[in-house]
């Protein structure tokens, strides 16, 4: 199993799905080999059966891990509250500064020009 | 007065009922996986056993029927596994925490960027206001207006 290409849950599930199809093909290949008129090749049957069992083990392990991670009830871990409140504070600061600047402008307008 | 029972649902936060329901669903899915995996392996094992050459030729049709039956069950178990994978895919799409967390991180980055931009703007306004205030003060204290007030 290549972990670098299975870094998301969807990718892992997709790989499991492909592996299930492969398992059926392996079973079919074994039966075809057993049905050959010249007799089954022992090494062929052994390798396919071993691969079959290894694939089933990987499927089971991966599915159990995905079920546990998907169904586990836990509170939502990420929250943007801090960033959002900081943004609101900046907005309030801007409003305050704008009012101060407006007052400053009014004060400056009261005095006649020195020209 | 009729009392139809039925308690109210859970609150907005995590509750014991929601956790219990999630746990039951998890157990059911795990049991389903184990059942399907066991069925696939056992049926394949039985097929290989039935494929052994036997001496009495009269059992050939019976063995062929058994092999077909086992093969059918094997395919059905695999189909059940594929349906389970499809359900998990939907769960991953609609309620996957990874994608939600990524979205929240993106929002946090955007908020931080806006806040930083605002802070820089405020700092620039402060600098400009300070410079303007100094200029105004110099003009005021060197003007005739101040003399008249004294």
Image (cartoon, coloured by chain):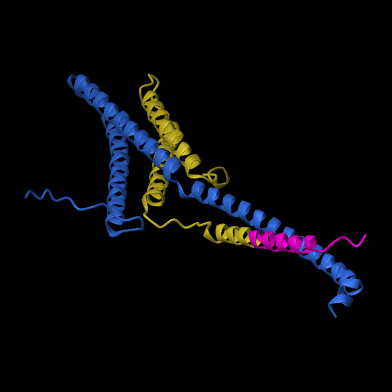
Chain colours: A yellow, B blue
Please state the horizontal and vertical placement of residue B111, each as a whole percent of the image. 61, 54
Q: A82 or A113: nearer the eye?
A: A113
Please state the horizontal and vertical placement of residue A87, each as a whole percent of the image. 60, 58
**Horizontal side of residue A51 vs A92, given as left or right:** left
Magenta region, mostly helix, strand or loop? helix
Residue reaching furthest front? B148
Q: A59 or B95: nearer the eye?
A: B95
Q: In the rendered image, is residue B107 in sight?
A: yes
**Horizontal side of residue A108 vs B79, given as left or right:** right
Q: Residue at x 41, y 47 (%)?
A: A66
Instruction: Decide whether residue A113 is among the magenta residues.
Output: yes
Q: Residue at x 29, y 27 (%)?
A: B71
Q: Residue at x 56, y 60 (%)?
A: A85
Instruction: Decide whether residue A50 is among the magenta residues.
Output: no
Magenta range is A94-115
Please state the horizontal and vertical placement of residue A14, each as a whole percent of the image. 47, 36
Q: Is residue B131 above or below residue B86?
A: below
């Amino acid at each position: 199993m290549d972990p670098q290409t299975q870094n998301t849950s969807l990718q892992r599930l997709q790989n499991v799905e492909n592996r299930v199809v492969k398992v059926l093909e392996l079973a079919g290949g074994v039966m075809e080999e057993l049905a050959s008129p010249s007799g089954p090749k022992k090494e062929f049957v052994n390798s396919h059966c071993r691969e079959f069992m290894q694939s089933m083990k990987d499927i089971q392990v991966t599915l159990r891990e995905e079920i546990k991670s998907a169904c586990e009830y836990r509170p939502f871990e990420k929250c943007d509250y801090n960033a959002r409140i900081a943004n609101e504070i900046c907005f309030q600061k801007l409003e305050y500064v704008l009012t101060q600047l407006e007052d400053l402008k009014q004060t400056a307008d009261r005095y006649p020009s020195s020209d | 007065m009729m009392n139809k029972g039925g308690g109210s649902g859970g609150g907005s936060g995590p509750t014991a009922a929601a956790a219990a329901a999630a746990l039951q669903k998890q157990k059911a899915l795990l049991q389903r996986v184990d059942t399907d995996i066991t069925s696939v392996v056992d049926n394949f094992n039985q097929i290989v056993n039935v494929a052994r050459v036997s001496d009495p030729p009269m059992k050939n049709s019976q063995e062929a029927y058994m092999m077909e039956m086992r093969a059918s069950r094997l395919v059905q178990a695999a189909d059940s596994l594929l349906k389970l994978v499809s359900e998990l895919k939907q769960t991953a799409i609609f309620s996957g925490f990874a994608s939600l967390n990524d979205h929240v991180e993106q929002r946090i980055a955007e908020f931080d960027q806006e806040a930083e931009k605002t802070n820089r703007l405020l700092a620039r306004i402060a600098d400009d206001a300070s410079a303007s205030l100094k200029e105004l003060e110099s003009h005021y204290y060197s003007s005739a207006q101040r003399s008249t007030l004294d």
